[in-house]
Amino acid sequence: MSNKLKVIPLGGLHEIGKNMTLLEYDDEIIIIDCGLTFPDDEMLGIDVVIPDFTYLKKKASKIKGVFLTHGHEDHIGALPYFLKQFEAPIYGLRLTLGLVELKLQEHQVMDRTELNVVKPGDVIHLKNFDVEFIRVSHSIPDAAALHIKTPYGSIVHTGDFKIDYTPIDGCLIDLNRFAELGRDGVTLLLADSTNVDRKGFTMSESTVGTTFDNIFRNHQDKRIFVASFASNVHRIQQIVHSCHLFNRKIAFSGRSMVNVTKVAMELGYLKVPENMIVDLFDIDKYPDNELVIVTTGSQGEPMAALSRMSKGEHRQLSLQPNDLVIISATPIPGNEKSVKKVIDKILQLGANVIYESLADVHVSGHAKEEELKLIHTLIKPKYFAPVHGEYTHLTHHGLLAESLGKSKSEVFIMENGKGLEIDDEGIRFTKKVPSGRTLIDGLGIGDVGNIVLRDRRILSQDGLMVVVLAIERESGKIVSGPEIISRGFVYVREAEDLFVDARNTLCHALSELEKDNVTEWATIKNTIRDTLKTFLYQETRRNPMILPIIMDV
Amino acid sequence: MSNKLKVIPLGGLHEIGKNMTLLEYDDEIIIIDCGLTFPDDEMLGIDVVIPDFTYLKKKASKIKGVFLTHGHEDHIGALPYFLKQFEAPIYGLRLTLGLVELKLQEHQVMDRTELNVVKPGDVIHLKNFDVEFIRVSHSIPDAAALHIKTPYGSIVHTGDFKIDYTPIDGCLIDLNRFAELGRDGVTLLLADSTNVDRKGFTMSESTVGTTFDNIFRNHQDKRIFVASFASNVHRIQQIVHSCHLFNRKIAFSGRSMVNVTKVAMELGYLKVPENMIVDLFDIDKYPDNELVIVTTGSQGEPMAALSRMSKGEHRQLSLQPNDLVIISATPIPGNEKSVKKVIDKILQLGANVIYESLADVHVSGHAKEEELKLIHTLIKPKYFAPVHGEYTHLTHHGLLAESLGKSKSEVFIMENGKGLEIDDEGIRFTKKVPSGRTLIDGLGIGDVGNIVLRDRRILSQDGLMVVVLAIERESGKIVSGPEIISRGFVYVREAEDLFVDARNTLCHALSELEKDNVTEWATIKNTIRDTLKTFLYQETRRNPMILPIIMDV
């Protein structure tokens, strides 16, 4: 075998989200997950961020399949964009592909796509790869790890996982299969690092159900709202269970909540007694103590249903003093302040709020330290490369592996684009291949880059000032202007003096140019820019964007 | 007595920061604190936010003094702006006024200001008010509560406080004085609510010193960086102590760190052994194990020294694998993600980081639940109004007072602008007076309002498109243009087709207008705006600001 096996992450390393890893051998490439992430604060106006697919462009014909570990956005969200450029069969468990279908229909790329539903234990056979799906626990049903047989031995990718001994759907993580693989020998383990810096063991999802029951019992006269991730079907199943116990109807609020619960019910993952579900438009027909509304917005997202309710801007729902809101989620880093704001607004409306720090209304979907130790110990891989996490998480996970007996030379902290290659000689880092981020803004894929973002940042800080001149083509003389128009700079009506002074300063500079017979547009524009910049900074300590425009007439 | 005593908060309620409360009786107004806060995410381009002083404008001559509880920005930061509009003597303990002086000099308003240094126990006598300073513990030396004798009895304002039985400067909170006041009778208590939702008792500042000693002991070969708030003089004193124990020199990095430590040393609050301090420019002369660098940037602020080091952009300091960085602070809500980013970057440079979740390198400066219970119990006021906090904190604090025996009618949740009035008849809420926020942007005070912010937001999301036409004055005919210029919208070089199509669409719409002999500029501008908006949304799903400009020639 002269070929190398390459393992190349295109996303998910040194970051949370847009997970995507590819395995390449000879003329075959398989892709594990194809996720998106949400923009940082500095990516102004960007909707979502996906991996850079450049590396795959010249190798499109090699792609033999995309294997999805589960149906979260950070694992499937980039698929529609991927499928606009590439063709490949998609493999995943049933709910995963149900959610993918929803997404592909929205993006109108469903027709051209082959979706292959597999079951845990199924193996997809390719020329160089055999891919096996292994059930794991996570905060969405049908989460899987992947076991891939390659010409250089077995690779296990855990996907996102936790270990839940009492899952509410009875579908246990297949620890026995991991044990078998460990016995037979695994060359490389790629494992989820999200919660590696948390001690102990993540509680079972079922503990949340007990909390819900208690809260429902203690608030029997209240109308109850529960905010949760739409994809957390187990969580919603438990809310349904509490509704059943306490004779309440349930309504779903928020587009993704309505869509995902519909798919989950159709596919049998969410079981709701007949007549329990009521439409949002009908909730006024039921007294407070017979209603539960399950809603999006647990992250304080400004456009989600819960935020709109908290601001009194929701069309069907208005929060009242007899309402209890349970926020059944924990803020993703960066969302802490928005969530707090929503809680504050709800309290101001007189309603009550229960959130994670007040009661056990949420558990994580990711394995903590002790769970990771168990997986490492069962699989006992020859080499280990942590995935899914910031650099901090990856290094912690590396140290965890070392604490279990791995040597430094057996642990590899990869980067996006810089993966591993394995051959008869051993294992080593690859050279860095194109990777990075592609920004999605509206319909544009990658048409917003650093220059556009820089301009947006400048505009967002101090606004802009447009200066227009009309110059006669033959004579080069100014025949109209300079006109000054500003936006986002200062409240114009109260700054008339400033604008008069700015115009006078400009006219003076332009007449100096005229004296010197300068007619080059570039020089005129630079003079406008420099003169105005200096003047405005001196007067206001602000640096708006200055946009000189010359019309020839 | 026919007059009412009014207690009016102009800031600090339903928010964290810009604390300012005034007491008004007859022809006298006294002001407690005059702080700033930092802008929310949506206040694009804003530097700081201060209270709205409108209510005071017509009452300027009544203002008899500003009484400062301590020297943090959220209590003194708005003073320079206040003093540009009003004249009033300032009262405060020594370090507080040392920091005020620094600030007033920067803003060049020191000349016109009278600063009166007082000591704990001192009383300032006015016609209707006697104001007494009482020592409390906080994360800055010289923090005080205020006891104000009024025509309607005593009012106690705690300022920011905690209870520290073992303060590192030996200056104990004067619990005995609070006990005396309680015995003699207090009409109204205004108390800090920042930590009311945390159970237990805030640890003593001195516990952090023990942690520092242990860390220094276990990292004797490393160069050590400590990031902390510049104003946390106690913290810095303890770092100095550990430096002394382990024979290290100390250097200060960051403008505010250098300035504040200088003032604190001059005034005797920070005691550093001779020859311990070295200049940042000289640190290369010392081996790693003999150096500690105390730096700003504990909140992940992008321009602070630590952030610049983490990005390799600091002129004097570059982090290396033999460096240990201690982040001796906790992220203020909203800063969690920036702090995590900085930690991640430092780890990538190979240096080590210790932060709060890894070791006890920080304690809060605010009283938790049990401390608040003690203060309420000692002071046993007739009425209680919580201050300093979001609505959530204020209501929690109200419930805490009720749990100690207050009735609902004795607890008042005020708002900014809506305070209390007390007279012979009793106590009640005032009508709401002008309050709110004044935005500071560069030299502009309040010249950025909702319109400017809205424009900045639109510009930040999708950029702008300027359309310029030249129209002949007499004929009303278009003689040049439409010219289209965009910024922050799309990378122009790769979107030439889009611009050609946009221009064609515009030309078509304009020629329709010409056919109909429409020459009103307003109609032409509206047509440009609507046509382009529809076209661009259809093509890109983006909504840039569209700015039509007509030049007449």
Image (spheres, coloured by chain):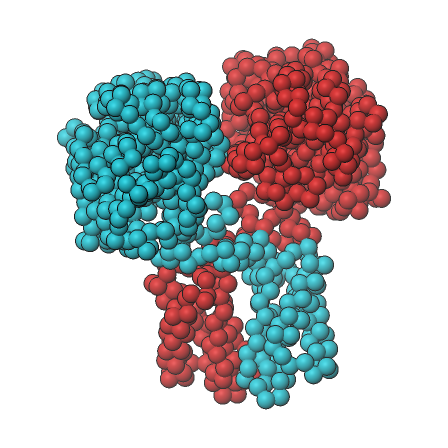
Chain colours: A cyan, B red
Q: Nearer the viewer, residue B310 or A331?
A: B310
Q: Quadrant of residue A67?
A: top left
- In the image, is A121 to the left or to the right of B306? left
| Camera sees residue A371 | no
**Above/below status of A301 relative to B289:** below
Q: Nearer the viewer, residue A275 or A210?
A: A210
**Residue at left offset 74%, top offset 47%:** B85
**Above/below status of A451 relative to B39:** below
Q: Position of residue A258 (x, y in %)?
A: 26, 40
Q: Position of residue B364 (x, y in %)?
A: 61, 23
- In the image, is B224 to the left or to the right of B127? left
Quadrant the N terminus of chain A occupies = top left
**Residue at left offset 18%, top offset 39%:** A125
Residue most toward the left?
A274
- In the image, is A376 to the left or to the right of A271? right
Q: Position of residue B425 (x, y in %)?
A: 62, 25
**Residue at left offset 64%, top offset 74%:** A523
Q: Quadrant of residue B134?
A: top right
Q: Nearer the viewer, residue B362 or A396?
A: A396
Q: Position of residue B123 (x, y in %)?
A: 80, 23
